[in-house]
Image: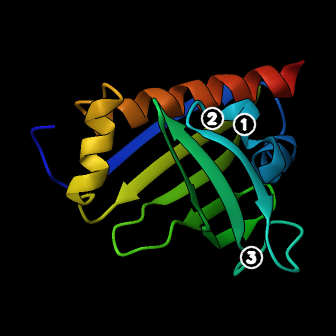
Amino acid sequence: MTKHEPISTTVERVIPASPETLYAIVTDVARIGELSPECRGAEWVGKNDGAKVGARFKGNNELGKSRWSTKPTVTAAERGKVFEFKVPMGFGPTWRYEFHAVDGGTRVVESMRQDKASPWFIRRAQRKAGVTDRAANITAGMETTLANLERLATA
């Protein structure tokens, strides 16, 4: 990995489904493994049972042989409009999904912003998994996520 910089990337896709339907799939964190190539599963923690600001969930991630868990906090949740969560730690990214009604469906915008570079030990684990450009890897994963969201919503 040649750059040790913050990451900001966005992808979008028009999906022939309602914003409410797509929001319901994205915010059902137990289904994240059906969407994401890196997050293999998740569950709400504590007394949380759904998307609302301040709710937390535990996400289980995998990249190559590396496995780790995080407990993000929901920072925005407006049904059919926006779902956003922040991964803890000083360098943890913010993930955001926006849902915009358009002719023929919904334009879904997925973005990720990490304001501080990952620590050296995380970059090393990424290299061991064959990831030399984390921003490109995340962008490709987001494109896969939205393709899987369309598949699930239109099945």
Cα gap from disc 2 to disc 3, whole angstroms: 20 Å
Element under disc 1 = helix
Quadrant of image for the C terminus: top right
Q: Which mark is residue 36?
A: 2
Residue underneath mark 3: 55
Residue 91's spot in the image, x, y percent?
34, 67
Q: CA distance from mark 1 to mark 2?
A: 6 Å
Q: Is residue 84 above or below residue 67?
A: below
- The amino acid type, in three-letter code, at marker 3 is Ala
- In the picture as drawn, the residue positioned furthest to the left comes out as 2
Q: Is residue 33 visible?
A: yes
Tell how many labels.
Answer: 3
Q: Is residue 66 left or right of residue 144?
A: left
Q: Position of residue 41 (x, y in %)?
A: 72, 45
**x 70%, y 24%: residue:** 148
Question: Residue at left 83%, top 31%?
Answer: 17
Q: Residue at x 79, y 44 (%)?
A: 19
Q: Are marks 1 and 2 in contact (CB under 8 Å)?
A: yes
